[in-house]
Image (cartoon, grey):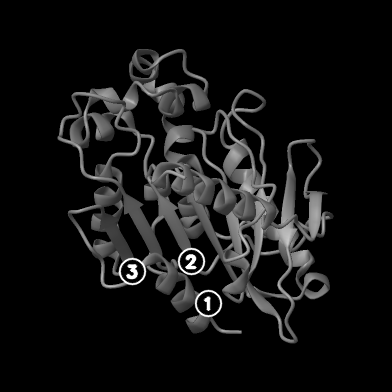
């Protein structure tokens, strides 16, 4: 029997075991809002005490993607419960629907804290690409709770105690992005299509029409001194200006946010592969925000 055959057999066996070990949600397809796309999955970690909760927001440019339907058992051994949300994409409803849905999901989850045995004061968010942008938006945006609302969900806080953002966009401002990253970045439809523009040229030509919405949905706009810590992760930094590729996951997004956070005086850990290494890794960051948050 050849070494290649044995190696292939072992790989297939490990892959099958890994697939078999994927865990279905404790509560699946839970509706958190009035639209059919506003659903979430929740994995409950058994514990005598309320656990922290990590909420995953999927990427896809606010134009595609879907929530996790299974969870890795290793992730569920870290001592915190896990949720993953769907939300209205821009093809269904333009921004700010996606970020407002993410906020409502956090508010809804807080109504389930006692029943699902997690600590409502220890909720953090994690996402990649557009999911990272939404995670950062939640970290920095003012609390959307309305104590006088007739809807009990909307009376809850939308604030989180930390965010992990992988390849996230920190601003939708095309003029800032052209200057700091390059024109190729703003050609990506996430920058213009999600706010209703016909193209990046149309967005920039009619900036007065789209400015308020674009900046409202930009995490960079909302950074203030009372905001929680965030952890940013990017691949190798591309040249500036971007020559090849769309630049939509460019490390320049992270550097813009880190500069703003340093000015304000709040923690922002930036990791750029083979280039910038923060004093803490992702897993330890999550542990830290959960352990330091007041229970």
Which residue was labeled with disc 2? 162
Measured as percent of width and height from the top left, residue 138 is found at 53, 55
Measured as percent of width and height from the top left, residue 145 is found at 67, 60
At x 47%, y 61%, the residue is 163
Measured as percent of width and height from the top left, residue 109 is found at 73, 61
Q: What element carries label 2?
A: loop
Q: Earlier in the sequence, mark 3 or mark 2?
A: 2
The C terminus lies in quadrant = bottom right
Confirm or deny contact between disc 3 and disc 1 (CB under 8 A): no
Few, some or many C-alpha atoms within 10 Å of disc 1 (few <14, some 14-19, many ≥20)? Answer: many
Nearer to us: label 3 or label 1: 1
In the figure, 39 relative to 268: above or below?
Answer: above
Query: Is there any visible trace of residue 146 in the rendered image?
Result: no
Q: Earlier in the sequence, mark 1 or mark 2?
A: 2
Q: Observer-nearest residue: 41 or 274?
A: 274
Which residue was labeled with disc 1? 290
In the figure, 36 relative to 77: above or below?
Answer: above
Which residue was labeled with disc 3? 266
At x 41%, y 42%, the residue is 4
At x 66%, y 35%, the residue is 88
- Whole-angstrom CA distance, mark 3 to mark 1, is 17 Å
Q: What element carries label 3?
A: loop
Query: Is there any visible trace of residue 65 in the rendered image?
Result: yes
């Amino acid at each position: 029997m050849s070494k290649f055959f044995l190696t292939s057999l072992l790989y297939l066996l490990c892959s099958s075991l890994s697939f078999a070990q994927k865990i279905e949600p404790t509560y699946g397809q839970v509706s958190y809002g009035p639209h059919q796309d506003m659903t979430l999955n929740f994995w409950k970690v058994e514990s005598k005490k309320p656990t922290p909760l990590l909420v995953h927001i999927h990427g896809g440019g606010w134009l595609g993607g879907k929530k996790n339907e299974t969870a890795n058992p290793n992730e569920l051994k870290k001592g915190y419960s896990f949720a993953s949300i769907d939300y209205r994409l821009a093809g269904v409803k333009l921004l700010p629907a996606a970020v407002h849905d993410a906020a409502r999901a956090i508010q809804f989850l807080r109504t389930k804290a006692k029943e699902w045995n997690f600590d409502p004061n220890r909720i953090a968010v994690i996402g990649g690409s557009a999911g990272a942008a939404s995670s950062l938006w939640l970290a920095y945006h003012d609390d959307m709770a309305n104590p006088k609302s007739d809807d009990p969900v909307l009376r809850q806080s939308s604030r989180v105690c930390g965010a992990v953002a992988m390849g996230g966009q920190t601003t939708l401002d095309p003029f800032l992005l052209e200057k700091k990253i390059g024109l190729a970045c703003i050609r990506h439809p996430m920058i213009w299509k999600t706010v209703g523009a016909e193209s990046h040229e149309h967005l920039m030509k009619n900036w007065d029409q789209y400015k308020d919405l674009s900046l409202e949905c930009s995490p960079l706009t909302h950074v203030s001194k009372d905001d929680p810590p965030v952890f940013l992760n990017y691949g190798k930094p591309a040249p500036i200006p971007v020559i090849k590729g769309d630049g939509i996951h460019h490390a320049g997004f992270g550097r813009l946010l880190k500069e703003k956070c340093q000015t304000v005086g709040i923690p922002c850990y930036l990791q750029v592969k083979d280039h910038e290494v923060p004093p803490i890794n992702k897993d330890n960051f999550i542990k830290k925000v959960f352990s330091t948050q007041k229970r």
